Amino acid sequence: MNRVSDAAGPSAPEQIRNVVLVGASGAGKTALFEQLVAARIPGRRAREGGDLAATLSLTAASIPSGEVTLNLLDTPGHPDFMGEVRAGLRAADAAVFVVSAADGVDEPTRLLWRECDVLGMPRAVAVTRLEQARADFESTVDGCQRAFGDAEPLALPLIVDGTVTGLLNLLRRTVTERSGGGDVDREPTTDEGELIDAQRGELIESVIEESEDEGLLERYLGGEEVDTEAVSADLRLAIATARFFPVLPTHAPNGVGVEALLELCEKGFPSPVGAAVPTVYTPAGGDFGAVTCDPAGPLVAEVVHTTTDPFVGRQSLVRVFSGTLRPDEPVHISGHLQHFASHLVDEHADHDTDDERIGPLAAPVGDETRPRSAGIAGDVVVVAKLAGAETSDTLSRKEKPALVEPWLLPNPLLPVAIHAKSKGDEDKLASALQRLVAEDVTMRLEHNAETHQLVLWAMGPAHVDQLIGTLDSRYHVAVEVEPVRTSLRETFVRPTKVQGRLVKQSGGHGQYAVCHLEIEPLERGAGIEFVDKVVGGAVPRNFIPSVEKGARHQLEKGVLAGYPVVDVRITLVDGKAHSVDSSDMAFQTAAGMALREAANDSTVAMLEPVDEVHIEVGDDAVGGVLADLRGRRGQVHGTEPAEVAGRTVIHAEVPAHELARYPVDLRSVSHGTGSFTRSFVRYDYMPPALARELTAP
């Protein structure tokens, strides 16, 4: 990041507004974000097109806007980066949903709206892409009302010869035109006035219904002219308390609607003082006490995003919930993802440290920063060189350590095996991956000891591409992708009798061991049993443990295709020994030889891991998902209504091999509405043809 001149920053939480932009990919969030920032930062020009890396990551800008400091956060629209969206929601106190007038509201946006509804977060809608041929503002508003509820437009787009030139302001009954890089207000023409009046009454009624003045609606319906300022005050209160959701048309290329949206953020959205604070514990899980947005209170802050800059090192975007963050002061860092997460987060081991000092503070402005002397409660700041903190970690004082319950973390479910292209990059790859894990809590690494693969678990193909691209561009490590191998098991499927015979004479001390084994299959999950039925001392007692050790060692290595053998009983029934040439190693070797001799396609079968999956989809996608599961050899155990209306949960068991690309395929078959969880349940028989395909040399 580049550093520019100092920014004073807010002096009280009441002067702060934290707003996040969310919406579907291609809706125009980043273009709108750039225009909002450029409108308040002198000399800054909105970048066209945007940086691809920025569009796939959480980006923040702290900008002076009227009497407040507006911390604006831009989130990715691609579904692979939902973790970044939820991090943005954690940092913000209000959300602007960006909806394309050409595409309308998609199902993932509906689901995200419901998440915000559960949080009680104030929301507004910015309608974009109005210049496109298939764009329809009225239809888009209707779609928002069906999807979101009480969403009403505050303005209508003024479109002249296919170009968006301004806004028709419904409440003020004025026209705002974009001219010479600025906004100019004027009285509406007759036709414009008729358009305004056709919808103004509905807006005023909707606002008055939320008014604390219970008689205002009756007086208005009785013909009394209402005071615009009074209605505006009621409107701001309804927006701030998430009882009314305004819709604004915007056109980022020429700045139409930008000032109106900034004014909404300044005057309509609440300060952090009135926002909900996430649950806070002590690191041991105890009661931390009440946390309020007070700069003089105990320090409670959370790392919501982490990046590594090649010039200045690690950069942590931090939301301060309580207290004041100052440079060069020691902080306690707590990270306990393993306690809160519903899935494996082995790379993020629980940690607590007291010896970390806060580095330089700054206000983010996209890819630039402005130095700050402090970060007060409610603010969002960048902390440099916070080496011991990962994304979602809590910062607090050593004297009163805290632990903020992290936001909902999506589970990475797409596995990709990678390896360094060159031998010299292997050490660099390990170091680079450690840094990426600290930045991104939606990726997971697995070092599979059985398949000897390094498996990167990601949210989807775009996430994989981003991670591999970062390894190359930032850390200069080139990697190659290879198919993920399934961890299989072998088992005997019918009783078998076999002899293991080792007889070697080389002129000196020889090797002699004979053992007769009976092998029986056991039920799934029974494990390995070893039984001694030798009579008459055919195998001396001191060599019987050698036979068991040799057998168990061979079972671990596999007997047919090199995978561990499970669920069998090995019984030693007879054998022979030599008084001189028999030894511990000879009987171990003979036992292994016996098991290998017994193994063939008729006696041994391959087992594959089977996962229990719970899939949530929209009701209209259930049929397609069920058909897809049948094609994956899945066993459906039932369906039930989800907690959210219009959605269904499907319970099934599916071989893990069939789930390798399931995050991608589910997204396709469910039209983006599906999500799922998976967990290992057991090993079961694999079809012989598939087993031969996967175990072929």
Image (tube, grey):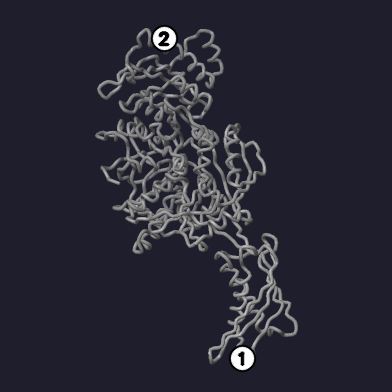
Label number found at residue 194: 2
Q: Given the current orientation, which residue lies at the most extreme right position?
A: 536
Q: Which quadrant of the figure has residue 624?
A: top right
Q: Mark 1, residues whose alpha carbon is within 10 Å: few (<14), some, or many (≥20)?
A: few
Relative image position of residue 628 (x, y in whole percent): 57, 41
Residue 200 lies left or right of residue 516; in this view the side is left
Whether residue 334 is visible: no
Q: Residue at x 49, y 21 (%)?
A: 142
The residues bearing labels 1 and 2 have C-alpha atoms spaced at a distance of 112 Å
Q: Name the spot of residue 419 as percent of width and height, x first.
A: 41, 58
Q: Tell me: 251 left or right of 594.
A: left
Query: 510 and 445: which one is in front?
Result: 510
Residue at 34% from the left image edge and 42% from the top image edge: 364
| Label 2 secondary element | helix
Residue 414 vs 109, above or below: the answer is below
Q: Are marks 1 and 2 in contact (CB under 8 Å)?
A: no
First in sequence: mark 1 vs mark 2:
2
Horizontal and vertical percent position of residue 558: 57, 67
- 476 up-or-down from 69: above or below: below
Residue 546 point in image, percent of width and height:
63, 79
| Front: mark 1 or 2 | 1
- What SS does tag 1 mark? loop
Query: Which residue does the numbered mark 1 point to in the structure image?
Result: 580
* Amino acid at dot 1: Val
Q: Residue at x 26, y 25 (%)?
A: 181
| Amino acid type, mark 2 | Glu
Vertical placement of residue 385 versus 250, above or below = below
